[in-house]
Every structure is written in structure tokens, then in C-alpha cells.
Image (cartoon, rainbow, N blue to C red):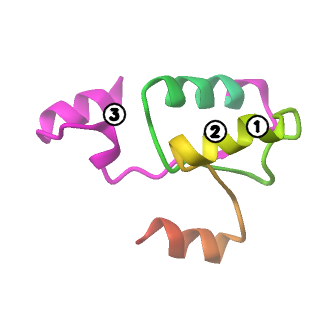
Amino acid sequence: MIALTLKDIFGKNDINELPIAYNIAWYEQKAVIVLLALLYLGVKNIHLGPTIPGFLSPNVVSVLVEKFGIAGITTPDEDMKILLN
């Protein structure tokens, strides 16, 4: 809700135009729900880690990468370089 409100306040057409980075450690059940909510909202370029969830089939991972730009988390230094671009 906060991101959607910020989108409206800043006059953006899409939530992905906001300078927000999503870096999710998915090992908790809550993180999976957060991921599903972000995907529902159409958020792209989410970084998951420390690895891509093993419970996702290769086909599902392929769709998530292709349509949503899902990527894995690397090292903190490398992630900061990616997120700051």
C-alpha cells in the first residue's frame, strides 16, 4: 500500500518507476507471502536469496526471470552495485 501511494504522490505510471529495491531472504514463510504480493502488484527486478527457492520448478523460475526479472542475491558489495544502478 505504501509503494502504491508513493506511486500516486510522485505521479508515476507504474510502481516499478519508484526507486525501491526489493531484496528478499525467502527462507521464512512470511517472505514467500511478501514475494507473492509483490508479484501480484507487478513489481519487477526482485532479488531473492540466498539462492533461488528450491521448491520452484525450472519452468516457474524461467517465467519469473523472463516476466519479472527475478534474480538471485549475490554478495552484499555486488548487490549494492546492482541496486545503486
The image quarter containing residue 29 is: top right
Question: Mark 1 and mark 3 in contact (Cβ < 8 Å)?
Answer: no
- Residue 84 lies, in percent from the top left, at 43, 70
**Residue 73 included in the magenta stretch of the image:** no
Q: Secondary structure at mark 3?
A: helix
Amino acid type, label 2:
Val
Label placed on residue 59: 1
**Residue 7 included in the magenta stretch of the image:** yes
| Marks 2, 3: nearer the viewer | 2
> Which of pointers 3 and 1 lies earlier in the amino acid sequence?
3
| Residue bearing mark 3 | 3
Q: Secondary structure at mark 2?
A: helix
Residue 68 drawn above or below residue 42: below
Alpha carbon separation for disc pair 3 and 1? 29 Å
- Residue 18 lies, in percent from the top left, at 29, 48
| Residue bearing mark 2 | 63
Image point (76%, 37%), residue name:
59
Image point (48%, 65%), residue name:
83
| Marks 3, 1: nearer the viewer | 1
Question: Mark 2 and mark 1 in contact (Cβ < 8 Å)?
Answer: yes
- Residue 56 lies, in percent from the top left, at 81, 34
Magenta region: 1-30
Amino acid type, label 1:
Asn
